[in-house]
Image (cartoon, rainbow, N blue to C red):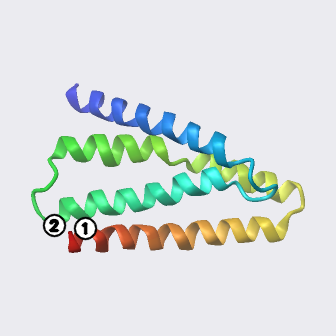
Amino acid sequence: MKQWLLVFIGGGIGSVLRYLISKSFNTYFAYFYLGTFLVNILGCLFIGLILGLSFKGNYLSENQILILATGFCGGFTTFSTFAFEKHALLTAGELFHFSFYLISSIVVGIAAVAFGLWLAKVL
Protein backbone atom coordinates (compact mmCIF):
# COMPACT_ATOMS: atom_id res chain seq x y z
CA MET A 1 0.00 0.00 0.00
CA LYS A 2 2.84 2.38 0.80
CA GLN A 3 4.24 1.95 -2.72
CA TRP A 4 0.90 2.83 -4.30
CA LEU A 5 0.74 5.97 -2.18
CA LEU A 6 4.24 7.03 -3.30
CA VAL A 7 3.29 6.60 -6.96
CA PHE A 8 0.03 8.47 -6.32
CA ILE A 9 1.77 11.43 -4.67
CA GLY A 10 4.52 11.63 -7.30
CA GLY A 11 2.00 11.31 -10.11
CA GLY A 12 -0.19 14.04 -8.66
CA ILE A 13 2.71 16.47 -8.37
CA GLY A 14 3.88 15.63 -11.89
CA SER A 15 0.38 16.06 -13.33
CA VAL A 16 -0.15 19.47 -11.75
CA LEU A 17 3.25 20.66 -12.94
CA ARG A 18 2.52 19.33 -16.45
CA TYR A 19 -0.78 21.21 -16.48
CA LEU A 20 0.87 24.47 -15.46
CA ILE A 21 3.66 24.19 -18.02
CA SER A 22 1.34 23.15 -20.85
CA LYS A 23 -1.11 25.92 -20.02
CA SER A 24 1.74 28.47 -20.05
CA PHE A 25 3.60 27.37 -23.18
CA ASN A 26 1.14 25.70 -25.58
CA THR A 27 -0.12 29.06 -26.84
CA TYR A 28 3.27 30.26 -28.17
CA PHE A 29 3.06 28.60 -31.60
CA ALA A 30 0.10 27.75 -33.81
CA TYR A 31 1.34 24.32 -34.92
CA PHE A 32 3.84 23.30 -32.26
CA TYR A 33 2.68 22.38 -28.77
CA LEU A 34 5.67 23.76 -26.88
CA GLY A 35 4.33 22.96 -23.41
CA THR A 36 3.72 19.30 -24.21
CA PHE A 37 7.09 19.10 -25.96
CA LEU A 38 8.86 20.63 -22.93
CA VAL A 39 7.26 18.33 -20.36
CA ASN A 40 7.98 15.25 -22.42
CA ILE A 41 11.62 16.23 -23.03
CA LEU A 42 12.16 17.26 -19.40
CA GLY A 43 10.52 13.99 -18.32
CA CYS A 44 12.98 12.08 -20.53
CA LEU A 45 15.88 13.99 -18.98
CA PHE A 46 14.57 13.40 -15.45
CA ILE A 47 14.00 9.68 -15.92
CA GLY A 48 17.46 9.29 -17.45
CA LEU A 49 19.00 11.09 -14.49
CA ILE A 50 16.89 9.24 -11.88
CA LEU A 51 17.49 5.80 -13.32
CA GLY A 52 21.12 6.64 -14.08
CA LEU A 53 21.66 7.49 -10.43
CA SER A 54 19.97 4.26 -9.39
CA PHE A 55 22.20 2.24 -11.77
CA LYS A 56 25.31 4.03 -10.53
CA GLY A 57 24.97 2.90 -6.97
CA ASN A 58 22.76 3.13 -3.94
CA TYR A 59 21.96 6.80 -4.44
CA LEU A 60 18.22 6.23 -4.57
CA SER A 61 16.07 3.78 -2.67
CA GLU A 62 13.33 1.72 -4.30
CA ASN A 63 10.75 4.08 -2.77
CA GLN A 64 12.55 7.16 -4.13
CA ILE A 65 12.60 5.60 -7.59
CA LEU A 66 8.88 4.85 -7.30
CA ILE A 67 7.91 8.39 -6.34
CA LEU A 68 10.28 10.07 -8.81
CA ALA A 69 10.47 7.82 -11.90
CA THR A 70 7.16 5.96 -11.82
CA GLY A 71 5.06 8.59 -10.06
CA PHE A 72 6.44 12.01 -10.96
CA CYS A 73 7.73 11.23 -14.47
CA GLY A 74 4.65 9.14 -15.23
CA GLY A 75 2.33 11.97 -14.20
CA PHE A 76 4.51 14.72 -15.67
CA THR A 77 4.89 13.32 -19.18
CA THR A 78 1.97 12.64 -21.45
CA PHE A 79 1.84 10.27 -24.37
CA SER A 80 -1.92 10.55 -24.80
CA THR A 81 -1.78 14.33 -25.27
CA PHE A 82 1.21 13.90 -27.57
CA ALA A 83 -0.82 11.45 -29.72
CA PHE A 84 -3.91 13.67 -29.70
CA GLU A 85 -1.92 16.69 -30.85
CA LYS A 86 -0.36 14.65 -33.68
CA HIS A 87 -3.84 13.57 -34.74
CA ALA A 88 -5.04 17.19 -34.69
CA LEU A 89 -2.14 18.24 -36.93
CA LEU A 90 -2.84 15.40 -39.37
CA THR A 91 -6.57 16.13 -39.62
CA ALA A 92 -5.77 19.83 -40.16
CA GLY A 93 -3.58 18.83 -43.09
CA GLU A 94 -0.41 20.11 -41.43
CA LEU A 95 1.85 17.31 -42.63
CA PHE A 96 5.07 19.33 -42.26
CA HIS A 97 4.25 20.41 -38.69
CA PHE A 98 3.10 16.89 -37.85
CA SER A 99 6.38 15.41 -39.14
CA PHE A 100 8.57 18.04 -37.50
CA TYR A 101 6.87 17.70 -34.11
CA LEU A 102 6.88 13.90 -34.24
CA ILE A 103 10.52 13.51 -35.29
CA SER A 104 11.84 16.25 -33.01
CA SER A 105 9.97 14.82 -30.01
CA ILE A 106 11.40 11.35 -30.55
CA VAL A 107 14.97 12.40 -31.39
CA VAL A 108 15.26 15.05 -28.66
CA GLY A 109 13.52 12.75 -26.15
CA ILE A 110 16.00 9.94 -26.71
CA ALA A 111 18.87 12.43 -26.57
CA ALA A 112 17.51 13.81 -23.28
CA VAL A 113 17.40 10.31 -21.74
CA ALA A 114 20.98 9.71 -22.90
CA PHE A 115 22.06 13.06 -21.48
CA GLY A 116 20.39 12.29 -18.16
CA LEU A 117 22.14 8.92 -17.97
CA TRP A 118 25.47 10.56 -18.84
CA LEU A 119 24.89 13.32 -16.27
CA ALA A 120 24.23 10.71 -13.59
CA LYS A 121 27.59 9.08 -14.38
CA VAL A 122 29.56 12.30 -13.99
CA LEU A 123 27.86 13.44 -10.78
Q: Are marks 2 and 1 in contact (CB under 8 Å)?
A: yes
Judging by the rendered image, the residue that carries numbered circle 2 is 56
Please, what is the three-letter code of the amino acid marked with disc 1? Answer: Ala
Residue 31 percent coordinates (x, y): 79, 58
Disc 2 or 1, which lies upstream in sequence?
Answer: 2
Q: Is residue 59 left or right of residue 4?
A: left
Q: Nearer the viewer, residue 77 or 123?
A: 123
Instruction: Give the alpha-carbon distance from disc 2 to disc 1, as whole Å.
Output: 7 Å
Q: Residues within 10 Å of mark 2 (few under 14, many from 20)?
A: some
Binning the other alpha carbons within 10 Å of mark 1 as few (below 14), some (14 to 19) or many (20 upward) gives some
Identity, as a three-letter code, of the amino acid under mark 2:
Lys
Give the left or right position of residue 83, taking residue 15 as reference: right
In the rendered image, the vertical position of residue 55 relative to residue 11, given as above or below: below
Q: Is residue 47 above or below residue 14?
A: below
Q: Secondary structure at mark 1?
A: helix
Q: Vertically, is 104 above or below 64?
A: below
Q: Secondary structure at mark 2?
A: helix
Instruction: Name the residue located 50 percent from the left edge and 48 percent from the top edge.
Output: 77
- Give the x, y percent position of residue 109: 50, 66
Q: Residue 103, which numbered label? A: none
Q: Is residue 121 left or right of residue 100?
A: left
Q: Quadrant of the C terminus?
A: bottom left
Image quarter where the N terminus lies is: top left
**Residue 40 location (% of width, % of height):** 53, 55
Q: Residue at left 79%, top 66%?
A: 97
Residue 114 against residue 34 in the figure, above or below: below
Residue 51's image quarter?
Answer: bottom left
At 29% from the left and 27% from the top, the residue drawn is: 5
Q: Which residue is mark 1?
A: 120
* Residue at the image position 83 percent from the left and 68 percent from the top: 95
